Image (spheres, grey):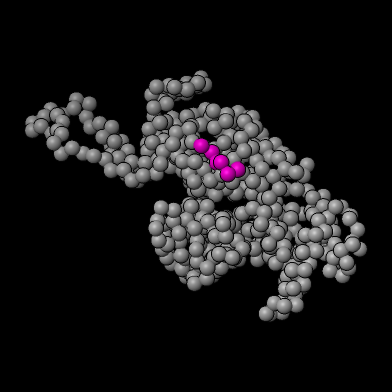
Amino acid sequence: MALQVTGLPTILMRSFFMLRNTLASFVAALALTICAPLGAVEEQGKLPLDELRTFAEVYNQIRLGYVEEIDDSTLLEYAIQGMLMGLDPHSSYLTKDAFQNLQDTTSGEFTGLGLEVGMEDGYVKIISPIDGSPAAEAGLQSGDVILKLGNVPVKGMTLNEAIEIMRGPKGSKIELSIGRPGETQPFDVTLVRNTIKVASVRQSWLEPGYGYIRIAQFQNSTGTDVRKALEKLMAEQKLKGLVLDLRNNPGGILRASVDVASLFLDGGNVVYTEGRVANADASYDADPLDVTNDVPLVVLINQGSASASEIVAGALQDHGRAVIMGTRSFGKGSVQTVLPLSDSRAIKLTTALYFTPNGRSIQAEGIVPDIVVERATITAYNDPQQITEADLSGHLNNANGTSKDKKTATVASKLLADDNQIYEALALLKGLNILGLRDKKVVPEVNGES
């Protein structure tokens, strides 16, 4: 049966049989074209006979004249790879190892460099490094292009071939030649392969009352993990606002993205898909949960936020439930379905596009933040000439004792230096609370607190 790899709806077996029959018709027509004159081929199904004849001629020339003998099965596999690679960056032919690697990635643990990648203009482009991976620790960024793997140029490789080279035993090394937008020259980086354990969700407090949840990747359990993180935060203290960090999250399982969006919505559509095959059309709605009781929410995205991340951001944006902050997301709005061809081979085929509740296609456009905040290094300016009452000799102490605001200000200054986007998100949440610039549900008093 078809395998769900991005969480989007799988095409049922009927689609597989349609595909298999199409391939069978193609092979039959190819055999007839090779063995018989063009005029002897009946025009069944309006097959492109001229193109099939050209294909057969090229196929035969390779069989007879290529410098090394290649068996027919290998040549046909190359033809399949070429057909899929020419469609879009995400459709591909999966060998047994590639299929296993795909399953390992979605399970949350595998051995490699920790990169989510795609193919663009014949090169491997980094969509996002995975948190805590060798690639992330080496400073690789979304948008970087891999030019060489070791001494082997990437140009001309299939995506699966490049991934196979990047995978390897734990502790082994590989050198990557990287091209980065804005840099005039490529640079080399040596990475040590390691076991990549993707911690899907983690939570913390930014300041008292203001929580932070980071989703690194959408796995099968991510919805449950986010709910547990929220419950833990709310059990510790009253939640005044929350930052949901989806930056450099390459996506994953669609069902998980719907589960996460449901935690912040009182029902309504999260995403719907449209494709040529009827079974590719589907709609996913949120459960009426909103376990946060409409607490102010800021969602952080950037160029490395793709697929399921964009589904969550787009849904919360369309429903007016969250302020989206950061930079424009990656723009992967297509659905890939894995269709098995045999026990050891499959194809990953783009079968549909997905749309936000308001009908926006994310494909090649991405999610545009409500508030654009570029990632930057910011240093607070302290005027050495500026003095305050507390600097004067013999000043009186504050009658209320030591202020907690000084400690909070110190924490905020460190956050500004470490991550200015989180700092801006926190500032916005505090402003929403102070000014009350949102429609607020009435929350009953509990132990004197509302």
Say whether residue 141 is left or right of residue 40.
Answer: left
The image shows residue 143 at horizontal and vertical percentages of 48, 52
Q: Magenta segment, principal secondary structure?
A: loop
The image shows residue 129 at horizontal and vertical percentages of 49, 54
Work out whether 109 lies above or below 264. below
Q: Residue furthest left?
A: 393
Q: Quadrant of the N terminus?
A: bottom right
Report which quarter residue 277 is drawn in. Answer: top right
Q: Residue furthest bottom?
A: 68
Q: Is residue 4 visible?
A: no
Work out whether 145 lies above or below 316. below
* Residue nearer the viewer, 5 or 450: 5
Say whether residue 384 is left or right of residue 336.
Answer: left
The image shows residue 363 at horizontal and vertical percentages of 60, 43
Residue drawn at the location 56% of the way across and 57% of the way down: 121
Stretch of the chain drawn in magenta = 363-368
Residue drawn at the location 12% of the way across and 27% of the way down: 396
Say whether residue 258 is left or right of residue 407.
Answer: right
* Residue nearer the viewer, 300 or 414: 300
Report which quarter residue 92 is drawn in. Answer: bottom right
Work out whether 377 lies above or below 145. above
Q: Quadrant of the C terminus?
A: top left
* Residue nearer the viewer, 418 or 94: 94
Q: Is residue 45 visible?
A: yes
